[in-house]
Amino acid sequence: EAQVTQNPRYLITVTGKKLTVTCSQNMNHEYMSWYRQDPGLGLRQIYYSMNVEVTDKGDVPEGYKVSRKEKRNFPLILESPSPNQTSLYFCASKGLAENTDTQYFGPGTRLTVL
Amino acid sequence: RKEVEQDPGPFNVPEGATVAFNCTYSNSASQSFFWYRQDCRKEPKLLMSVYSSGNEDGRFTAQLNRASQYISLLIRDSKLSDSATYLCVVTLNAGNMLTFGGGTRLMVKP
């Protein structure tokens, strides 16, 4: 089954404790992206990647890092989480070779930083 | 001013009603346009792309007016299962940078 998976789905942590949210897709997609969703602000793009070893900032990259060492994985790293990073995070992927702009989203990770 | 603006609703309509959502965007360089659907606490899913010529998919019709920087979605014969939040999305940078509107919530009642 074609899918985007995220882990963990739920995480409660404390300020300053480094964490990584993993994202993996099995569709051989070149493009992957991270978003956060907050009430009243909608979804905002954090980082995206066009292919292995190619990453670019989205609208709200501050406080986040990403890496793309393999095509299927695009982890989101919070080196020193703060309470304002409490949010619902979505990973998405898209095939660039396909004649479509459809992005496939993962199920989301709900992060709480205390 | 937000880059993509939508009326948050909620729109409460009876089954069978026709309902229209609007969306405006501020960046005239925006390249592609979409409507996504998001159910409560779930991931967004593509509903349809939006073209200047207008496009229809069953009960759903989307329209783009580039001159006015305005996008619309029309849902005819509303079903209970149409209850969701509808997200207007515009893209830049060859579709790699997405900007979402805040979403319009639709509630279809029996």
Image: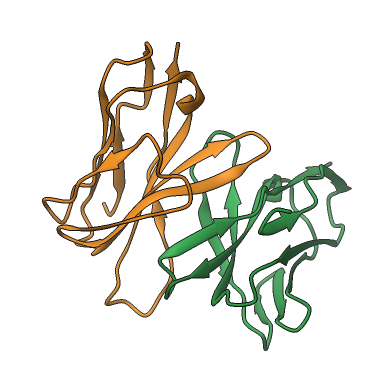
Q: Where residue A67 sits: x, y (%)?
A: 20, 46
Please name the colour scheme applied to the rendered image. by chain
Height in image: A13 above or below B3?
Answer: above
All told, the count of numbered labels is: 0
Residue at point 30%, 50% (across, down): A3
Chain in green, by letter, is B
Q: Is residue A52 left or right of residue B98?
A: left
Q: Nearer the viewer, residue A48 or B88?
A: A48
Can you say whether B2 is above or below A78 in the image? below
Furthest-left residue in view?
A: A69
Identify the image quadrant of residue A13.
top left
Instruction: Tell me the orange chain.
Output: A
Q: Position of residue A6 (x, y in %)?
A: 30, 37
In the rendered image, the vertical position of residue B3 relative to residue A78, given as above or below = below
Residue A22's quadrant in the figure? top left
Quadrant position of the C terminus of chain A in the picture = top left
Residue at position x 64%, y 70% from top?
B27
x 11%, y 50%: residue: A69
Q: Residue furthest bottom?
A: B53
Q: Is residue B92 left or right of residue B15?
A: left
Q: Residue furthest front?
A: A62
**Residue depicted at 26% across the width and 51% down the height:** A1
| Position in image of residue A52 (x %, y %) | 15, 59
Front one among A15 and A20: A15
